[in-house]
């Protein structure tokens, strides 16, 4: 039984490297629970269904009702994947439930959401997806210590 290979992109904002680190990424470090990070959703099945090769943090463009709904925990990454379209990364298949107070200005729960990533990281992951036929999947969504998703 062969495993599917994938490149993972946790849909979360942040910096790739701290100042003074010589541009090196801090590999293998996860945010510590209680250190200002609030986890919203995690794709636990991805670790079993795919072979994880690399990961990167990136931001998401969201509407106001989506942010409020995510704070209530109404996010599912079960069928989500990331597609490269027109030089941008898009989160497809994620489901952010309706926010009950938004009324007629509510968002579409399954709409594609643009991911924000540095150009160098984009070129690296988009190249791997094109050349080697890898799948890009989100692993986790969380709010950072500043409250940004």
Image (cartoon, grey):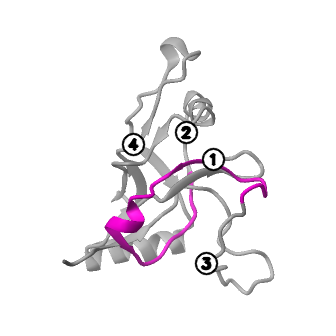
Q: Which residue range is magenta in the image?
A: 33-59
- Do residues under tags 4 and 2 come within 8 Å of each other at their CB atoms? no
Q: Is residue 84 left or right of residue 70?
A: left
Real-space Cα separation, disc 4 to disc 3, in angstroms: 29 Å
Where is mark 2, residue-wise?
A: 62
In depth, the one of 32 and 141 nearer the eye is 32
Q: CA distance from mark 1 to mark 2?
A: 9 Å
State which quadrant residue 51 falls in.
bottom left
Query: Pointer 3 and pointer 1: residues touching (CB < 8 Å)?
Result: no
CA–CA distance in space, label 3 to label 1: 21 Å
Residue 30 appears at what percent x and percent y? 65, 68
Q: What residue is pinned by disc 1?
A: 149
Q: Position of residue 21 (x, y in %)?
A: 76, 84
Label 1: element kind: loop
Q: In the image, what residue occupies the spot 60% across and 35% down?
A: 67
Magenta span includes 37:
yes
75 is higher (above) or lower (below) than 80: above
Position of residue 37 measured from the top left corner of the image (x, y, whole percent)? 71, 53
In the image, is 101 to the left or to the right of 111?
right
Image quadrant where one finds the N terminus: bottom left
Going from the N terminus, do you reach mark 4 or mark 1 first? 4
Q: Is residue 123 above or below residue 38?
A: below
Q: Identify the residue shown where x is 60% and y is 31%.
A: 72
Residue 28: mark in rendering: 3
Pick whichever of labels 4 and 3 is earlier in the sequence. Answer: 3
Estimate how packed mark 3 is, as few (under 14), some (14 to 19) or many (20 or more) residues with alpha carbons within 10 Å.
few
Q: Mark 1: few, some, or many residues within 10 Å (few <14, many ≥20)? A: many
């Amino acid at each position: 039984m062969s495993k599917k290979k994938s490149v993972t992109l946790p849909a979360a904002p942040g910096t790739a490297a701290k100042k003074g680190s010589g541009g090196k990424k801090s590999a293998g470090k996860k945010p510590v629970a209680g250190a200002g990070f609030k986890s919203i959703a995690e794709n636990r099945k991805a670790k079993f269904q795919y072979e994880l090769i690399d990961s990167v943090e990136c931001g998401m463009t969201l509407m106001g009702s989506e942010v409020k709904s995510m704070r209530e925990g109404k996010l599912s990454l079960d069928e989500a994947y990331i597609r490269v379209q027109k030089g941008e990364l898009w989160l497809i298949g994620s489901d952010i439930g309706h926010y009950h107070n938004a009324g007629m200005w509510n968002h579409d729960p399954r709409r594609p959401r643009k991911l924000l990533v540095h150009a160098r990281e984009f070129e690296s992951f988009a190249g791997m997806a094109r050349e080697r036929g890898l799948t890009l999947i989100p692993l986790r969504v969380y709010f950072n210590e500043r409250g940004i998703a």
